[in-house]
């Protein structure tokens, strides 16, 4: 949904005005809050609404979900550790503001991680350019705000990290849904801050207003979707979240350096094509 952001809502309204007066309007969304529902109805005339009866069914199969409790100061160190230890094709890291997206992307780039960032303060042209670079596998790590949380399908993304927790379960569902697309395996890791939530600037300045603690949001997520999000273990079997793990295991078992290099090159080619 783009109508929950002020700047994009204006864009939708302008486009809508240019369309024929007599038209059929259809809208689809995995989730729809009461606030956005009222906005959406402004674009429709006596719409027929169809909803999923059991909201708990809105969950993701084949996706492993874990959490880590830590302070804000510990997040960067833990993120680097996670990226170093896990086997990923591509990763999406969600943060709560444009400023944090820029700063975290700079940190990752300075640490030699192939990172790029997308947020609402970028022009539409720049967003599309960065999105295409990520989709084309030119970068393997994307730092993003919730502007990237809906409707983006990139098959190679197998890990999502909630560096900052969302404010509500629906946002969580859309975020972690970036991993494990098209029936593939995926992994979602959420950083649960133990610091007290702090209100920030208004949305027009790229800030946010925290409603609940991260722990409370996690409880809401587990209750809403009837899923158990477990503490992140010290190690995770990569075959449970990456379909390329078996090929990597073959590489590690090769005794010949020459053969290992050839298989590694083959793996990179296959990874790009998958």
Image: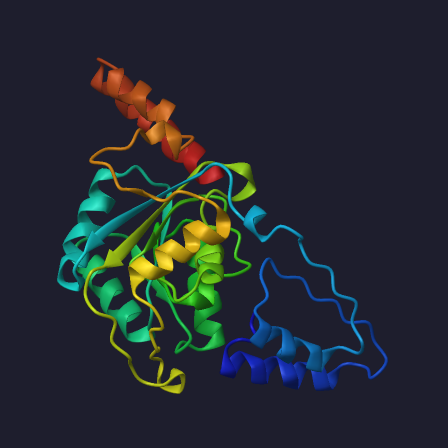
Name the spot of residue 118 as percent of width and height, x first.
39, 67
Percent from the top left, x then y, of residue 165? 33, 61
- Tell me where residue 225 appears, x and y as whole percent: 49, 49
Q: 231 or 129: nearer the eye? A: 231
Residue at image location 51% in from the left, 39% down from the top: 61
Q: In this rendering, would 197 be left or right of 226?
A: left
Q: Is residue 155 left or right of residue 253?
A: right
Instruction: Using the rendered view, name the quadrant where residue 11 is placed.
Output: bottom right
The answer to whether any part of residue 136 appears in the image is no
Image quadrant holding the N terminus, namely bottom right
Among all residues in the image, which is located at the extreme right? 22
Q: Position of residue 259 (x, y in %)?
A: 28, 18
Q: Is residue 169 left or right of residue 261?
A: right
**141 is higher (above) or lower (below) than 228:** below
Quadrant assignment, res 143: bottom left
Position of 64 compared to 251: left or right?
A: right
The answer to whether 123 is drawn above or below residue 73 in the figure is below
């Amino acid at each position: 949904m783009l109508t929950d952001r002020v700047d994009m809502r204006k864009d939708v309204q302008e486009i809508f005005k240019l369309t024929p007066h007599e038209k059929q309007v259809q809208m689809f969304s995995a989730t729809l809050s009461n606030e956005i529902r009222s906005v959406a109805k402004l674009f429709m005339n006596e719409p027929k609404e169809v909803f999923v009866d059991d909201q708990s069914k809105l969950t993701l199969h084949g996706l492993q979900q874990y959490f880590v409790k830590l302070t804000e100061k510990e997040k960067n160190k833990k993120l680097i550790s996670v990226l170093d230890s896990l086997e990923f094709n591509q990763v999406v890291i969600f943060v709560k503001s444009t400023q944090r997206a820029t700063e975290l992307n700079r940190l990752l780039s300075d640490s030699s991680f192939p990172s790029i960032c997308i947020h609402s303060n970028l022009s539409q042209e720049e967003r599309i350019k960065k999105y295409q670079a990520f989709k084309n596998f030119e970068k393997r790590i994307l730092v993003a705000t919730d502007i990237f949380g809906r409707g983006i399908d990139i098959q190679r993304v197998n890990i999502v990290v909630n560096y900052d927790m969302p404010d509500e379960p629906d946002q969580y569902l859309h975020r972690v849904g970036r991993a494990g697309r098209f029936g593939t395996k995926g992994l979602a890791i959420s950083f649960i801050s133990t610091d007290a939530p702090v209100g920030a600037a208004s949305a027009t300045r790229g800030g946010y207003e925290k409603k609940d603690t991260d722990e409370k949001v996690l409880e809401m997520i587990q209750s809403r979707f009837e899923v158990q999000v477990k503490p992140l273990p010290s190690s995770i079997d990569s075959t449970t979240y990456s379909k390329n793990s078996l090929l990597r295991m073959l590489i590690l078992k090769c005794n010949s350096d020459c053969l290992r290099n050839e298989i590694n090159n083959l793996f990179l080619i296959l990874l790009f094509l998958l």
